[in-house]
Image: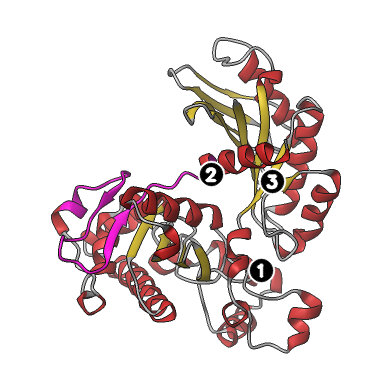
Amino acid sequence: MKILVVNAGSSSLKYQLLDMNDESVIAKGNCDRIGIDGHINHKTFDGRTIDEDCSFPTHTEAFEKLVEVLTTGEASVIKSMDEISAVGHRIVQGAEVFNKTCFATDEVINQIDALSELAPVHNHPHALALRACKKVVPESTPQVVVFDTAFHQTMPRKAYMYGLPYECYKDLHVRKYGFHGTSHRFVTMELAKTLGRNLKDMKIVSCHLGNGSSITAVEGGKSIDTSMGFTPLDGIIMGTRSGAVDPSAVEFVQKKLGFSPAEMSDYLNKKSGFLGLSGISSDNRDIEKAAADGNERAVLVTELLAYDIKKYIGSYAAAMNGLDAVIFTGGIGENASEVRENVCDNMEFLGIKIDKEVNAGTRGKLKRISTLDSKVEVWVVPTNEELLIARDTLALINQSK
């Protein structure tokens, strides 16, 4: 069975075609710059590539190009879209409406679009992509949606409520939603499988670190708290996002700089974080290089990042009354050994002891990086959200038969 996994952004359409018989990637790519000019990068399992400019006025044209490169030309991998058994879509915000994977009916797509106010950068493009896909893919091909927020719907009220008047929650739906749920779910399941343990018996802190980062407390396989909140802006410092800031400080800066609410949101989301503090870059690799060269603002970023993560690990260990393992995943989590070392340094009181030599030699692969006598195991677990979306899609199809 072949499943196409789609991750649509406001101006992009990332995809992977997977063979679920062995869960291998047949082809993957990205239709980028939708609505601007258009470009596609496509690569097959055996190394054939397409890299060219295209015309993508909307997501529909991007899907048409996706179908074209999969089925025709020198980099094709299937003869027709009839060979695809289903399409699985990643959806960022499902709010309290969606707590599990479901089929993408017209009603569901409209509901996803209606939640755009809670995720304006993501949900409307998701809806556009779903409608475009329905135009291009055979009508008989099931469309499935997998929600990033669904994993966090198990959080108790004390974790997701804010100290605002209750009407803000009841009438405006303001609460902590959490994100990166698909990634956190995948890596915790993968670790339990690797250890030969039942995930229901484990207490794990999962650190998804990248340009966007979130920390999640997973107890018994369920999310009980997470660092991102109403939006992906909350939590730890990120590439261009500030992370948690006193709301009064936000109001103060907005007035002093004469910003509109939209301009202030842009300031917090796109001009803060690593970029705003360092004045150098939003990329952690650039920050680490500058810090090594003695740039004090870059050093500050590295210290703040590690301190933020360390605090969440400690607080979540307290919330779960114990801790079995810490997971590092995502682009930074999987590859930045210095970040991992800085986070785990001086955590012996919590039972965390990192093997610095093993940690330094670990990049992008499943590996235990804690010492043998560490009471809490520390692991690097590469995430694979596309594979989990494909698995969810397959499971739903099998359940519906």
Q: Which residues are magenta?
A: 358-386
- 350 versus 123 height, above or below: below
Instruction: Pick whichever, 303 or 180, lies toward us.
Output: 180
> Of the residues under marks 3 and 2, which one precedes in the sequence?
3
Disc 3 crowd, CA 10 A, few/some/many (<14, 14-19, 20+): many
> Of the residues under marks 1 and 3, which one precedes in the sequence?
3
| Residue 144 appears in view | yes
Rendered residue at 36%/55% (across/down): 197
Q: Quadrant of the N terminus?
A: top right
Does dot 3 land on a helix, a strand or a loop?
strand
Does dot 1 land on a helix, a strand or a loop?
helix
- Between marks 1 and 3, how big is the CA–CA gap? 32 Å
Rendered residue at 79%/53% (across/down): 113
- Which disc, if any, is residue 145? 3
Rendered residue at 70%/30% (across/down): 62
Indicate the amino acid at tag 2.
Answer: Leu
Classify residue 123 as left or right of residue 385.
right
Pair 2/1: label in front: 2
